[in-house]
Image: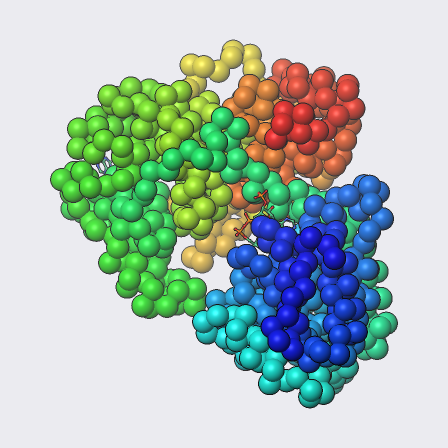
C-alpha cells in the first residue's frame, strides 16, 4: 500500500489513515492507497465497519492543486475523473464506512467524505466546496452528492460562494451525522460499532432533498442573477450552478459526467490558471529569501497606535479584532473623541449588517484604550504611527517613541509616501523601524505592504510578516521607494486614465472600460473616493521633481482648485447625491473639453480596448521597473498587492500574470506603439524588453530567481 495511506484495525473495525502532510491533499498515491484499503476491507471477513480519518492537523483539504497545473500543461494525464469511480467503490463497500472529519474537509476532501456512508466530525471542523475560488467547480461529484445531503439551496450556496460551513451547521444540514467531543477516532470507532451490520445509506441513491422542478427553477434563476452581480466576469460560479442543476434533472451518473465536462472547461480556462496562481501567490509572498523561517519572532501581545484619524482608527480596530489590546493616542481630546466615535460607528454598522454580534463589538471596544499621553507606551510590543503625512511631524513622533518604548519594541510607520530610513534616523534604533502600510479602510482591505528600511532587522521583518496573517491581512514585503510598490504603480495608472479623458474619452467611458475589465471600481471613481486633494497636495509638494516638457495631467488639479475633491465635497470627477451615488456631471465633461482645447490636446474617438491597454500596460511597465530595481521580491508579489489592495480582478491573476497571459512580446510591442504616440512616459522597462525578446514570462523570471 502507498506510504500515504495506512490500514490498521481496532478489533473488528478497520481504520484507514491518510498521512500526506501538510493538508492530506489527494496527491498521487492517496486515491490509490484508499482504493487498495477498501479492496482489502471488502475481502476481510473479520471487519464489520471502517473508519477513514486524516493524520495530523486535518482531514483532506482537497485535490492536490499542484497537479492541476501539470494537467493543463499536459505534463500528466491524470485527472480528477479517476476519483469518481473510487468514490463509487467506497460507497459500494460491503461494510459501512464512517468518515471522521477534523480540521477541514474541503473540495475533494468533502467529496470523499460524502462518499462514505456516515460522517462524524469534531466540533471545530469545517466542510466546504471552495473550488470556485480556484476558478473551477467540484470535480468528483460534489455538485451531485451535496444537494442530496444538504438540499439544493444550501448546495448551491456552498458550491457557488465557496465558503465553508462549520461542523455544527453541517450537522443541522445533514452533511454530518454526529459531532464528537473529545477524541475523534475513539468516537468514530464507537459510531462505527453502532452502525456495523446495518444497511448503509448511499448518498448517490438519495433523492428526498432534490426538490421539485418549480422550487428549483426559482432557486437557479436567483443564483444565476446573484452570481452575475457578486462574481462579475467569472465563469466558474455559473458552471457550478449548471452542475448542481444537473443533479436535479439527471441521474447521478449523467449528472457526474455533466459536472466533469464543466469542471474540465473551467480547469483549462485562463481564469482558473490565474486563480491558482493567486492561491499559491498568497502563500509565496510570506516567504522572504534572506529572512529564514526559523528567524525568532517578537511576541506582539499589546500594541499602540499614534493618531486616531482615518487610518489610525481602522488600524486600532484591526488589532482589537485580532484580540490584541491596543492603546490609541491622539494630540487632543477633541480628536480622540472624534476618532473613537468613528470606531464605534463602524462597529455598530457591522453589527447592523450582521457581520459582528453586539457582544463581539463590546469586547473589541474594551480592547481599545484611548490616551493623550505616551505614558503607557513603555509596555507596548509594537507601535504604529498614523499621524498626518509630513516628515517633520513623523520624526518628532519617532523621537518620542524612541524615548518611551521598551527595547525590542517594533516602531512602525503607516506613511504612504515618506522615506522610512529618514523616519528611522530620528531614533537610536533604526533596526526596530519598519513601514506597515495599511490600505483604507484599514479594517477592511486585506493588503499590508511591509516596507523594509535599510536597517530593519530580520526579527522585525519576520514578526510583521507573521503578524499580518494573525491580523487577517496579506503581508507583502516591499522596498523603500517613493510610493512603495502599489502607489508607485497606481500613479501612472491614474495618470493614463486622466490623459484618456483629456484626449477625448469621457469619465464614464474610462471607468466603464476598466470596470468591464473586472476592476472593482474605475480609476476616476476611485480618485473621488480617496479624495482628489490627497494626490493634488502630493503633486504640489513634488512639482520641482517633474521633468520640464513631460506631459502632466491637468484636469484633476483644476477640479481641485474648484474645490471638487471627490465624494467628501459631493463633487469631483462625478457629482454625488445624498446617498453618495455617483452621477455623471456634464459640467465636468464640458470643462475637460475646454481645458484640453486650451492646452492644444487633439481630440479623437478612443476605443474601450485602448483604454484598457493604456491603463493596464502602464501598470505592467512600472511593475517591471520595480521588479528589476528590486523593490518587489517577485512578480507575484506585485500581483498580490494589486489583487488585495487595488480591486484588481482575481480571475486575471494580477497585472504581471495578465501580461504573461497576453504574451510579453505582444505587451512589449503595444508599449512601444504607445511610446511612439505619447513619448517618454512609455519608455519600456528594460526587464520587459529582455523577457519579451527571450520569449519568457514574469512567472519564469520568478522561478529562475528561485521564488
Ligand atoms: N493542494 C496542494 N497544496 C495545498 C493544498 C491543496 N489542496 N492546500 C494547501 N496546500 C499547501 C499550501 O500551498 C501550503 O504550502 P506551503 O507551506 O508550501 O506554502 C501548505 O499546504 C499549507 O497551507 P496554508 O498555508 O494555506 O495552511 P493553513 O493552515 O492556513 O490553511 C487550508 C489550510 C484551510 C486547508 C488551506 O490551505 C486551504 O484552503 N487549502 C485549499 C483548499 C482547497 O481549495 N481545496 C479544494 C482543492 S480543488 C479540489 O479539491 C477539486 C476537487 O473537486 C476534485
Ligand atoms: P488623518 O488626517 O485622518 O489622521 C491623522 C491623525 O493624526 C489626526 O487625527 C491628528 O489629530 C493625529 N495627530 C497628529 N499629530 C499627532 C500626534 N503628535 N499625536 C497623536 N496624534 C496626532 O490622516 P490619515 O488619512 O489617517 O493618514 C495617516 C497616515 O496614514 C499618513 O501618514 C498617511 O499618509 C497614511 N495613509 C493614509 C491613507 C488614506 O487613505 N487616508 C492610506 C494609507 C496610508
Q: Where, quadrant-wise, is the C terminus in this rendering?
A: top right
Check the image and name the residue furthest to the bottom: 198
Splitting the image into four quadrants, where does ligand 2 fall?
top left
Does residue 215 appear in the picture of this structure?
no
Locate residue 149, reporting x and y percent.
Answer: 66, 78
The residue under the point 23% across, 41% down is: 380
Q: Is residue 696 above or below residue 202?
A: above
The residue under the point 74% across, 48% down is: 68
The residue under the point 82% across, 41% down is: 75
Locate residue 406, reporting x and y percent.
Answer: 20, 34
The residue under the point 65% across, 78% down is: 12
- Looking at the picture, the colour scheme in use is rainbow
Q: Is residue 607 above or below residue 195?
A: above
Q: Is residue 231 left or right of residue 179?
A: right
Check the image and name the residue furthest to the top: 548
Locate residue 108, reporting x and y percent.
Answer: 69, 61
Q: Is residue 130 above or below residue 572?
A: below
Q: Where, quadrant-wise, is the N terminus in this rendering?
A: bottom right
Q: Is residue 308 above or below residue 150?
A: above
The answer to which image quadrant residue 176 occupies is bottom right
Amino acid at each position: 500500500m502507498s506510504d500515504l495511506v495506512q490500514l490498521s484495525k481496532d478489533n473488528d473495525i478497520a481504520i484507514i489513515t491518510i498521512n500526506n502532510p501538510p493538508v492530506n491533499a489527494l496527491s498521487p498515491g492517496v486515491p490509490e492507497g484508499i482504493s487498495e484499503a477498501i479492496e482489502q476491507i471488502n475481502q476481510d471477513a473479520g471487519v464489520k465497519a471502517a473508519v477513514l480519518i486524516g493524520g495530523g492537523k486535518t482531514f483532506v483539504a482537497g485535490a492536490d492543486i499542484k497537479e492541476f497545473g501539470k494537467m493543463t500543461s499536459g505534463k500528466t494525464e491524470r485527472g480528477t475523473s479517476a476519483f469518481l469511480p473510487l468514490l463509487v467503490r467506497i460507497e459500494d463497500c460491503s461494510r459501512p464506512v464512517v468518515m471522521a472529519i477534523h480540521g477541514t474537509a474541503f473540495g475533494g476532501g468533502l467529496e470523499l467524505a460524502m462518499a462514505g456512508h456516515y460522517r462524524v466530525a469534531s466540533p471545530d471542523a469545517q466542510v466546504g466546496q471552495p473550488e470556485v475560488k480556484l476558478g473551477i467547480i467540484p470535480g468528483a461529484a460534489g455538485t451531485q452528492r451535496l444537494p442530496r445531503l444538504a438540499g439544493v439551496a444550501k448546495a448551491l450556496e456552498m458550491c457557488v460562494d465557496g465558503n465553508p460551513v462549520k461542523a455544527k451547521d453541517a450537522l443541522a444540514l445533514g452533511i454530518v451525522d454526529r459531532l464528537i467531543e473529545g477524541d475523534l477516532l475513539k468516537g468514530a470507532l464507537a459510531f462505527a460499532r453502532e452502525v456495523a451490520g446495518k444497511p448503509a445509506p448511499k448518498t448517490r441513491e438519495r433523492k428526498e432533498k432534490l426538490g421539485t422542478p418549480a422550487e428549483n427553477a426559482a432557486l437557479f434563476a436567483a443564483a444565476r442573477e446573484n452570481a452575475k452581480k457578486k462574481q462579475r466576469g467569472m465563469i466558474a460560479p455559473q458552471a457550478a450552478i449548471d452542475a448542481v442543476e444537473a443533479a436535479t434533472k439527471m441521474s447521478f451518473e449523467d449528472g457526474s459526467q455533466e459536472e466533469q465536462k464543466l469542471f474540465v472547461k473551467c480547469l483549462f480556462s485562463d481564469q482558473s490558471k490565474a486563480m491558482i496562481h493567486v492561491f499559491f501567490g498568497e502563500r509565496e509572498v510570506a516567504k522572504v529569501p534572506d529572512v529564514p523561517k526559523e528567524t525568532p519572532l517578537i511576541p506582539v501581545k499589546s500594541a499602540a497606535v499614534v493618531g486616531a484619524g482615518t487610518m489610525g482608527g481602522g488600524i486600532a480596530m484591526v488589532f482589537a479584532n485580532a484580540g490584541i489590546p491596543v492603546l490609541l493616542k491622539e494630540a487632543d481630546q477633541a480628536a480622540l473623541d472624534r476618532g473613537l466615535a468613528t470606531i464605534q460607528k463602524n462597529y455598530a454598522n457591522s453589527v447592523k449588517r450582521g457581520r459582528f454580534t453586539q457582544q463581539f463589538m463590546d469586547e473589541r471596544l474594551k480592547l481599545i484604550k484611548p490616551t493623550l499621553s505616551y505614558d503607557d507606551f513603555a509596555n507596548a510590543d509594537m507601535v504604529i504611527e498614523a499621524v498626518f503625512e509630513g516628515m517633520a511631524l513623523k520624526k518628532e513622533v519617532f523621537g518620542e517613541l524612541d524615548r518611551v518604548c521598551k527595547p525590542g519594541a517594533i516602531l512602525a510607520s503607516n506613511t504612504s509616501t515618506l522615506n522610512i530610513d529618514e523616519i528611522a534616523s530620528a531614533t537610536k534604533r533604526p533596526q526596530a523601524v519598519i513601514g506597515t502600510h495599511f490600505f483604507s479602510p484599514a479594517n477592511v482591505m486585506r493588503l499590508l505592504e511591509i516596507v523594509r528600511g535599510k536597517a530593519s532587522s530580520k526579527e522585525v521583518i519576520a514578526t510583521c510578516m507573521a503578524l499580518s496573517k494573525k491580523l487577517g491581512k496579506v503581508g507583502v514585503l516591499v522596498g523603500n521607494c517613493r510610493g512603495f510598490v502599489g502607489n508607485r504603480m497606481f500613479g501612472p495608472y491614474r495618470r493614463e486614465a486622466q490623459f484618456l479623458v483629456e484626449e477625448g474619452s469621457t469619465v464614464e467611458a474610462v471607468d466603464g472600460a476598466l470596470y468591464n475589465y473586472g476592476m472593482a471600481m474605475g480609476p476616476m471613481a476611485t480618485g473621488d473616493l480617496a479624495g482628489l486633494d490627497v494626490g493634488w497636495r502630493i503633486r504640489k509638494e513634488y512639482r520641482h521633481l517633474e521633468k520640464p516638457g513631460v506631459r502632466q495631467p491637468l484636469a484633476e488639479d483644476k477640479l481641485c482648485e474648484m474645490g471638487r475633491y471627490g465624494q467628501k465635497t459631493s463633487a469631483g470627477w462625478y457629482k454625488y447625491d445624498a446617498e453618495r451615488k455617483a452621477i455623471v456631471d456634464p459640467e465636468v465633461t464640458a470643462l475637460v473639453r475646454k481645458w484640453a482645447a486650451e492646452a492644444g490636446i487633439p481630440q479623437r474617438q478612443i476605443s474601450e480596448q485602448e483604454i484598457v491597454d493604456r491603463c493596464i500596460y502602464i501598470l505592467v511597465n512600472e511593475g517591471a521597473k520595480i521588479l528589476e530595481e528590486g523593490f518587489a521580491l517577485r512578480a507575484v508579489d506585485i500581483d498580490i498587492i494589486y489583487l488585495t489592495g487595488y480591486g484588481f480582478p482575481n480571475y486575471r491573476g494580477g497585472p504581471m500574470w495578465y501580461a504573461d497571459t497576453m504574451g510579453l512580446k505582444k505587451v512589449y510591442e503595444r508599449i512601444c506603439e504607445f511610446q511612439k504616440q505619447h513619448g517618454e512616459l512609455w519608455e519600456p522597462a528594460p526587464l520587459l524588453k529582455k523577457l519579451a525578446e527571450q520569449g519568457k514570462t514574469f512567472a519564469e523570471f520568478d522561478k529562475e530567481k528561485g521564488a
